[in-house]
Image: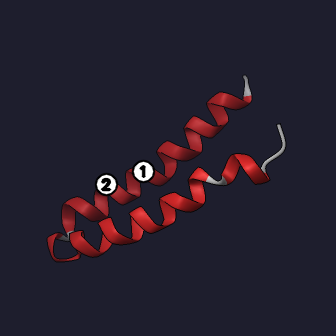
Amino acid sequence: MTYHYVWLGWSIGFLLPWLTLYATNPPFRPVMWRVSLVTAGFGLTEPIFVPE
């Protein structure tokens, strides 16, 4: 098993609860989008801090 699949597994592991919360809590959807967009910036800078 390569590390690419580990990253995919963890990504899906975080995406499923997010989708569940998004689907079950309509009043919080705008807040979830804003927070997700802000934290996506941290994810985009990850290659700078994670060694290859």
The one of 1 and 33 positioned closer to us in this rendering: 33
Judged from this view, the residue extending furthest toward the left is: 26
Q: At label 1, which amino acid type do we have? A: Leu
The residue depicted at 73 percent of the width and 31 percent of the height is 3
Quadrant holding the N terminus: top right
Question: What is the image's colouring?
Answer: secondary structure
Q: Where is residue 27 in the image (x, y as percent from the top left)?
A: 16, 77
The kind of secondary structure element at disc 1 is helix
Q: Residue 16: image x %, image y %? A: 39, 50
The residue to which callout 2 is attached is 19
Residue occupying image coordinates x 48% and y 43%: 12
Q: How many marks?
A: 2
Specify whether 3 is left or right of 37: right
Furthest toward the top, the residue is: 1
Q: Mark 1 points at which residue?
A: 15
Tell me: residue 51, above or below residue 22. above
